[in-house]
Image: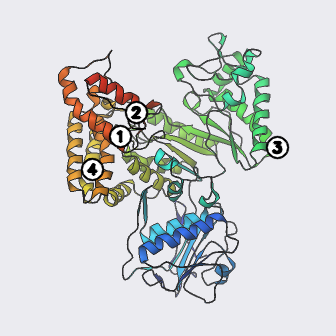
Amino acid sequence: MARGIIVYGVLIVNALGSASRGSDGVNLAAMQGWDIVVACDAIAAEQYAAQEFQRLLAEATGVEMPIVITTDRPDRHVFIGQSEPMRASHVGFDIQGFGDEDLRIVIRDANIAIAGGRPRGTLYGVYTFLEDYVGVRFLTYDHTFVPKVGPWRVVGPVDRFYHPPLGFRWSFCSETNDNKPFSVRGRNNTVADEAALGGRTAIGLINHTFYRYLPVEAFGQEHPEYFALVNGQRKFHSGDNPPQPCLTNPDVLRIVTEAVLAELRERPEARNVSVSQNDAFPEHQSWCHCEQCAAIDEREGSHMGSLLTLVNAVADEVAKVRPDVLVGTLAYQHTRKPPRHLKPRPNVQIQLCSIECSILHTIDDPAADKNAAFYRDLLEWGRICDNIFIWNYNTNFGNYQLPCPNLRIIEPNIRCFVANHARGIFMQGAYTSLASELSDLRNYMTANLLWDPNRSGAALMDEFLGLHYGRSAPPIRRFIDLVHDHAQASGLQTGCGGQAKDFAIDESIVQAGLAAFEEALALADNDTIRRRVEKASICAYRAAIEPVWKVSGENPVGDEVAQQAKPLVARWINLCRRYGVTQVYETKPFEDVARRISKGIGLPYTPPEP
């Protein structure tokens, strides 16, 4: 391979290198007579990649190339995946040593080769080629922008290798999770199981698991000593959540270890396993306060002390039988702070969670106190652990549809995580409902930045708005800027849940939002654009009905407020139903809220048609 430099995992090959010296590019406008070559034993994802290339390039060029498995000439081939004909060609190369998602693209002398590691590298290579050299944009699950090539489009010569800096990428929202082919086009490697779509990465999300390994229903009555001692009592509840275990009890270690090993026997494909605390609110102080657990935590200056002691012990046993497997645990709330002396075993994975942080500020913003504390923990974890993964919060979990002014921090936060050695990022968004606040834009920016953190968040926003909304984009962009500028000027530090006031959304923002989307609708060129603008406008109507958001029999509003709210609530309900809103936050059904608000302001409520 020609020499080059690596920027965020991309090898930019020197144009004077041996792979491209004296060669010509390819004119995409002159591909009549070309074919697509795949191996006779190509895996399902490579066959699907060839079909995706064939379909989308035909849409761009008007030329549908046949898919073949043999060649009878030296040129006019697009090689998809490694094959004997590809290796024998003058653009041929070997993928030996490539990672699962590594890809290489070679373009020169009337040939194109796109191949990568198995199972996903070739498929991702095709999408990279279509984006970077044809101009295709995978905007939403129902909108792929494919520009016409025109009479002249020369690309290359190119010799490009890409190794994704993040091995685990998940823009965790309904738009991605509910549409597997679209999730793969965004290079989320965590959603699709199907072989044709490349399957999931074998690294899974670290989440709460002690409740599964040590169920209170099975052990609580006979062995209360297995569970956390809190205020002198063995606790079997932590709010609505299962109890934490006593982490220094030797029987707990034995039971958890046996359960983990059994799980790995059932899942031989797995490359990690979760050994992690149950969910709980910090104010419950649900961790074990027994003498042994407390002594470790005091020595380590963190409740991670007793947890990591157990996790390390489990990891030692796992390493004996599955040295390829990471044992992961959450650094979450009371366990977020790294211990003073203990270090994770080499096969331990830390999933660091930013739930306390202000989502109006970047992770490394020293002006935000909670972010500064998290950033210190991030730096310290990076010094003692090679397997850092991030659980970040990317929406307002208390109000899915309310404007959430954190789009500007997606890019710097992802870059900050990558710069501090994160190997995977879980960006948790509105995952229980479609059509949350600007969800299509938010997902587009997030997925693209997870794949390539070197991209510009502002440029991605402009690109999406321009392609998706056309002439309607400028007023929408002005509204987005206004919401973000207003929140920044307020000095508020707000976590991942809150009401309008917590995000500096006042009457001036409401009126500006309604006006912006009214202008955008008037500028829409067709019904398709109009529907997209309507969907985006849900956030403005949600902000407008904030004065009656909590109305009920116990919390009434005055007649004047109710009368002003009626047309806005009616419009909000209509739009939410039209565009698939089912929840207003994680666990609250939309129709329950629509019914309550309607009743509270005297608006007739008609249930949706089944």
* Residue at mark 4 to residue at mark 1: CA–CA distance: 19 Å
**Label 1 crowd (10 A; few <14 / some 14-19 / many >=20):** many
Q: Are marks 3 and 1 in contact (CB under 8 Å)?
A: no
Q: Position of residue 136 (x, y in %)?
A: 43, 66
Quickly name the residue at label 2. Answer: 590
State how far apart marks 3 and 1 are (Cα): 53 Å
Mark with earlier residue (3, 2): 3
Q: Element type at marker 1?
A: helix
Q: Answer yes or no: do the residues labelled 2 and 4 have beta carbons within 8 Å?
A: no
Image vertical order of residue 83 relative to residue 289, above or below: below
Q: Is residue 560 left or right of residue 280?
A: left
Residue contact between numbered discs 4 and 1, judged by CB atoms under 8 Å: no
Label 2 with label 1: CB-CB less than 8 Å: yes
Residues 439 and 89: in front is 439
Regarding mark 4 in the picture, which secondary structure is present there? Answer: helix
Number of residues whose C-alpha sits closer than 10 Å to that of mark 4, classed few (under 14), some (14–19) or many (20 or more): many
Instruction: Report the residue marked by disc 3.
Output: 320
Q: Residue furthest right?
A: 320
Q: CA distance from mark 3 to mark 4?
A: 57 Å
In terms of depth relative to the viewer, which is nearer, 424 or 49? 49
Q: Give the percent coordinates (x, y) of residue 362.
A: 41, 42
Q: Amino acid at mark 3?
A: Lys
Q: Which residue is mark 4?
A: 476
User: Which numbered disc flags the more N-terminal residue, 4 or 1?
Assistant: 4
Q: Residue under circle 1? A: 576
Q: Quadrant of residue 111?
A: bottom right
